[in-house]
Image: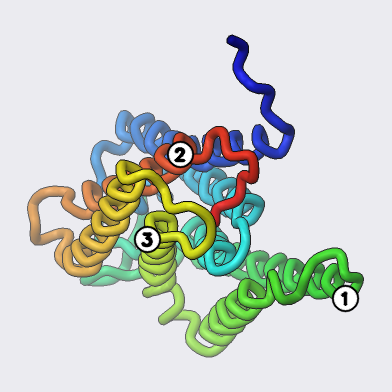
């Protein structure tokens, strides 16, 4: 018997899920290639300062766009739209470093701090993020005014976007040093925390039929795994140099694997959905 024909919308959602999972593969491949040049660093984020940078930034920006396109409706939309806001910040605001962490990158401090040579890059990225984010909100409001989209449907996402953009703008303007020191960590934790919430939401949806038991268990396992990873990340990052082993690298890689697993699981669960939404 021939397989049923899929609709264009179904194929779009399938390819978006596959594409988001693929961004993790891009990051891992770029890091693996960079290892041959700079060796094993203390974290995945450190590879921003290596030849892996272009692939790292490009993958996160691509994931952000796909998340917006795939965000569904209701609370699921708000969570994924918020995650889409933080992904570019992870990309354009690199992590802090300790002296000697990355060969050839000067870090003029005794402890962990932001490399001064990369401040112009971060400034360009943050300003671009704010301008594009503001334009996106403006376009959404215009479309709502023209009744091309429902303001009630996108209202929560718009509120979250305005809050995040305003917080970034104020922090960047009033406390740029603090922003550079903590921006990458905050954006990373927020991104994966939001995905833990998304996984829980998929395990216990408020609309439609609940997923099969196997998918519910997998979603819960992914959510729990992300929470554990985030706790470990926050606890271990300040002690990276004292551990004698790149534990933070393993923790960040684990978070990416769980992110990848979420999209594989959801892609399988919703592969043949007639209405390919996330709720």
Crowd rating for badge 1 (residues with CA inside 10 Å; few <14, some 14–19, many 20+): few
Q: Residue at coordinates 41% horizontally, 48% vertically from top-left?
A: 211
- SS at mark 1 in the image: helix
The quarter holding residue 14 reads: top right
In front of the other: 226 or 41:
226
Q: Which residue position holds label 1?
A: 145
Crowd rating for badge 2 (residues with CA inside 10 Å; few <14, some 14–19, many 20+): some
Q: Which residue position holds label 3?
A: 200
- SS at mark 2 in the image: helix
Q: Which residue position holds label 2?
A: 269
Q: Is residue 144 left or right of residue 39?
A: right
Earlier residue among tags 2 and 1 = 1
Q: Residue at coordinates 53% horizontally, 89% vertically from top-left?
A: 174
Earlier residue among tags 3 and 1 = 1
Crowd rating for badge 3 (residues with CA inside 10 Å; few <14, some 14–19, many 20+): many
Q: Residue at coordinates 31% horizontally, 57% vertically from top-left?
A: 223
Q: Quadrant of the C terminus?
A: bottom right
Compared to residue 74, the image places residue 209 above or below, namely above
Earlier residue among tags 2 and 3 = 3
Q: Is residue 118 left or right of residue 248?
A: right
């Amino acid at each position: 018997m021939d397989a049923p024909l899929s609709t264009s919308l179904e194929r779009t959602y399938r390819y978006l899920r596959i594409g988001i999972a693929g961004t993790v593969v891009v990051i891992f491949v770029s890091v693996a290639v960079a290892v041959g040049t700079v060796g094993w660093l203390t974290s995945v984020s450190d590879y921003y300062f290596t030849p892996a940078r272009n692939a790292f930034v490009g993958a996160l920006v691509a994931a952000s766009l796909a998340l917006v396109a795939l965000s569904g409706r209701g609370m699921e939309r708000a969570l994924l739209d918020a995650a889409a806001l933080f992904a570019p910040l992870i990309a354009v605001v690199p992590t802090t470093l300790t002296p000697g962490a990355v060969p050839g990158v000067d870090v003029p401090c005794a402890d962990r701090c932001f490399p001064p040579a990369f401040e112009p890059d971060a400034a360009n990225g943050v300003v671009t993020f704010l301008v594009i984010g503001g334009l996106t909100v403006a376009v959404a409001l215009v479309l709502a005014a023209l009744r091309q989209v429902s303001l009630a449907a996108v209202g929560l996402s718009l509120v979250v976007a305005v809050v995040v953009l305003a917080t970034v703008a104020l922090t960047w303007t009033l406390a740029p040093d603090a922003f550079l020191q903590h921006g990458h960590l905050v954006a990373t934790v927020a991104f994966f925390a939001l995905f833990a919430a998304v996984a829980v939401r998929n395990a216990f949806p408020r609309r439609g039929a609940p997923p099969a038991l196997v998918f519910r268990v997998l979603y819960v396992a992914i959510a729990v795994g992300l929470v554990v990873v985030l706790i470990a990340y926050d606890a271990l990052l300040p002690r990276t140099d004292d551990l004698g082993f790149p534990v933070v690298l393993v923790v960040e890689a684990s978070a990416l694997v769980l992110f990848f697993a979420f999209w594989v699981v959801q892609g399988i669960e919703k592969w043949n959905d007639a209405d390919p939404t996330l709720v």
